[in-house]
Amino acid sequence: MLTTGQYATMRGITVGEQKKTLRGADVGIPPRQLDFRLNEEMPRWLYAGNATATLFLVVLSGAFPPGEDFFVQSVNRFKHRVTDPTLRAQVAGFTGQEVIHSREHDRLNDVFRSRDIDVDVPEKAIALALRLLDLLPARQRLACTAQMEHLTALLAEELLSHEDFRTRIHDDLTELWIWHALEELEHKSVSYEVYETIGNSRRERVLAEVLVDATIIPAALVSWIWLVLAEGVWRRPRDIRDGVRMLFGPGGFVGRIIPRVGVFRKPDFHPDRHDTTALEAEWRERLFGPDGTLRDQLRRRA
Ligand SMILES: [Fe+2]
Ligand SMILES: [Fe+2]
């Protein structure tokens, strides 16, 4: 016999307090349909005029489409195990945000391609590394995703809380990277929460870090070196020295995250233990508040 709720659902009838399905936007993870028009006239070396550092961003941008696809698939693989409506909505929001990030980075990657910067190299190298991770059991893939989401959250926090990235990147690209960083913080705990749902294992987390270090990091490093050689930057050691210092030196956004990467291995790790809500609120206001720089673009799309 049908319950009242089942009957009502079958007939499309709303009964009493029948709850609506929560969406990502209801739980603070709204997929925002943005549409960045990238200026074809941007300079070739769009990070402080430095080729080495720009090519590092090419590697990052090339890594996002295959990487985010992997994240979404490994989280959604366990969607059926998530019964909490809030977490289900967070998974939906996370999925929507990552899909839009990939689309916008694909566009940026097309700009790199149009100027013969070989972004296919990092894209294919990362895709190959991910294919190796794909051979792992689904639980371990999810642990790897949680670890890589930890890395992206650390990078995102750096981009939002320090000025060095924002002052060095070309003005036409600032908002794309900053919007992506904000959303990475908004959904930073989703993959980890799903991992908790299926039973968090510290052994798998430690292994995840080893596996990511053995696959993704070398793929990124090798493709960066390949691009530096292909672009003839090796003939300009000063560019290499300045670029590496800008990224990994004391004032560099990559160098600053290195001491924090290992917290993922701690027994009591949880992404929310490090509170970034004030930083997120600040940037939501700066991008999408009444005077937000992306507010019009979002409204146009809506
Ligand atoms: Fe993303
Ligand atoms: Fe993410």
Image (cartoon, grey):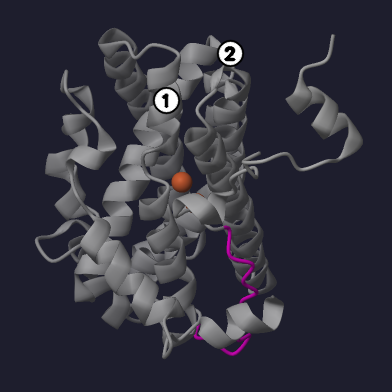
Q: Amino acid at mark 2?
A: Leu
Picture quadrant where residue 199 is located:
top left
- Looking at the image, which residue is at 46% across and 37% down? 219
| Pick the front one: 233 or 152 | 152
Look at the picture and state if 190 lies above or below 176: above
- The residue that disc 2 covers is 135
**Magenta residues?**
31-43
Between the C-alphas of marks 1 and 2, the distance is 12 Å
Q: Position of residue 90 (x, y in %)?
A: 50, 42
Look at the picture and state if 101 lies above or below 174: above
Residue 7 among magenta residues: no
Q: Position of residue 70 (x, y in %)?
A: 58, 34
Residue 253 in sight: no
Q: Position of residue 119 (x, y in %)?
A: 59, 57
Q: Which mark is residue 44?
A: none
Look at the picture and state if 104 lies above or below 83: below
Q: Quadrant of the N terminus?
A: top right
| Pick the front one: 144 or 133 | 144
- Tell whether 22 sits left or right of 244: right
Q: Look at the numbered disc 1 and give the secondary structure of its residue.
A: helix
Look at the picture and state if 149 lies above or below 175: above
Q: Position of residue 203 (x, y in %)?
A: 28, 8
Q: Give the crowd class for mark 2: few <14, some 14-19, many >=20 residues within 10 Å.
A: few
Residue 54 in sight: yes
Q: Look at the numbered disc 2 and give the secondary structure of its residue.
A: loop
